[in-house]
Every structure is written in structure tokens, then in C-alpha cells.
Image (cartoon, rainbow, N blue to C red):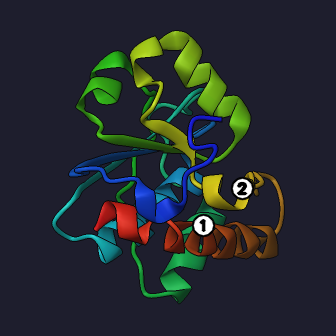
């Protein structure tokens, strides 16, 4: 592991561009990108999928859930991650170890800037796709708790 032996406070980054990645770019990454955009209004936050449902809007359950938390993701359009996005990003946050490994295998230059959003908790964010709205709420809460541990690095 890259950060073995380091405490969170030992690592300093300059982060302006953040890319959030999940599989289809219709559930978890739009939720995370919306949360991060509210938390970090001066940062450029984007999202994409490793197997995106290109051109589709966010999952209706994700839209409904985020609306209950006063966040509108109606305008989200799914897109596929590409090399240009990975080059532009200072930090790439994925939802799982598999997504992190896939990105690193496609673009080796990403090593050192691609991490699971739940890295500090050693946690994957489960995909709520095809489940009821409670699974989306669980994913949202897990994203929020994971992001809290990134705050001192992103700010």
C-alpha cells in the first residue's frame, strides 16, 4: 500500500481537480460529485464511469434521494472515463478496489493519485444499482463518512 507507515496528516497535496469514478456513472459517482461540489465550491469536481451508461441521466432513485437532501442531480449525464480526464485530475476517487486497479492498469500515470473514496476506512462503497432507495441512502452515508477523512487533504 502506498501510504503504509504514514498518518493522514503526513501527506500534503495540492488538489484543485477531482474526478470521482464508479462503474456506470449513474449512482455513486454522481452522488459523491454532488456532495463534494457543495463541500468544495472552489474545486473542479467531475465524475465518470469505468463502464459508463453513456448519455444516461442519474438513476431515478439517486435523483430522488439527493432531492430529499436538497441537492439536485437532475442534469447529470453519464460519461466514460478517458485519458484526458485522468491527466487533468489531481485526485481520482473510486468506489472500489477493482475500479482503482482498472484505472491504474489502463493509465499507469494515475498511480499515486487514484484511491478508493473509502481508502482511509479500507472500505468499498457498495453499488446500490437495482436495489431500493435504502441502498442508495447507505451508499450516500458511506460516501459522506469516507469523505470526512479526505477533508484535510482536499481543503
Mark seen at residue 96: none
- CB of mark 2 within 8 Å of CB of mark 1? yes
Tell which of 134 and 115 is nearer to you.
115
Residue at the front extreme of this rendering: 5
Mark seen at residue 125: 2
Task: Estimate the spatial distance between the alpha carbons at disc 2 and disc 1, rounded to whole Å.
Answer: 9 Å
Label 1 crowd bin: few (<14), some (14–19), many (20+), radius 10 Å: many
Eyeballing the image, is 21 above or below 145? above
Location of residue 79 in the rendering, given as x and y in whole percent from the top left corner:
42, 34
Residue at 79% x, 76% y is 134
In this figure, which residue is indicated by the disc labeled 1? 146
Residue at 49% x, 81% y is 67
Eyeballing the image, is 64 above or below 3? below
- Which of pointers 2 and 1 indicates the residue nearer the eye? 1
Q: Is residue 74 visible?
A: no
Label 2 SS: loop
Chain-order first, disc 2 or disc 1: 2
Location of residue 115 in the rendering, given as x and y in whole percent from the top left corner:
54, 42
Residue at the right extreme of this rendering: 131
Residue at 64% x, 24% y is 101
Label 1 SS: helix
Location of residue 50 in the rendering, given as x and y in whole percent from the top left corner:
57, 28
Residue at 63% x, 52% y is 119
Location of residue 89 in the rendering, given as x and y in whole percent from the top left corner:
30, 37
Q: Is residue 11 visible?
A: yes
Eyeballing the image, is 24 above or below 38? above
Q: Which image quarter: residue 155?
A: bottom left
Label 2 crowd bin: few (<14), some (14–19), many (20+), radius 10 Å: many
Quadrant holding the N terminus:
top right
Q: Which image quarter: residue 133?
A: bottom right
Eyeballing the image, is 152 above or below 6? below
Amino acid at each position: 500500500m502506498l501510504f503504509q507507515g504514514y498518518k493522514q496528516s503526513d501527506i500534503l497535496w495540492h488538489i484543485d481537480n477531482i474526478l470521482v469514478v464508479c462503474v456506470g456513472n449513474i449512482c455513486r459517482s454522481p452522488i459523491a460529485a454532488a456532495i463534494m461540489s457543495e463541500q468544495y465550491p472552489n474545486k473542479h469536481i467531475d465524475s465518470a464511469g469505468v463502464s459508463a451508461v453513456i448519455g444516461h441521466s442519474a438513476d431515478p432513485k439517486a435523483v430522488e434521494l439527493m432531492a430529499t437532501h436538497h441537492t439536485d442531480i437532475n442534469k447529470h449525464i453519464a460519461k466514460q472515463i478517458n485519458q484526458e480526464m485522468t491527466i487533468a485530475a489531481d485526485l481520482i476517487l473510486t468506489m472500489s478496489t477493482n475500479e482503482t486497479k482498472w484505472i491504474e492498469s489502463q493509465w499507469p500515470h494515475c498511480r499515486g493519485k487514484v484511491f478508493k473514496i473509502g481508502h482511509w476506512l479500507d472500505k468499498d462503497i457498495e453499488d446500490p444499482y437495482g436495489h431500493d432507495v435504502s441502498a442508495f441512502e447507505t451508499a450516500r452515508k458511506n460516501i459522506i463518512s469516507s469523505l470526512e477523512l479526505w477533508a484535510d487533504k482536499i481543503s
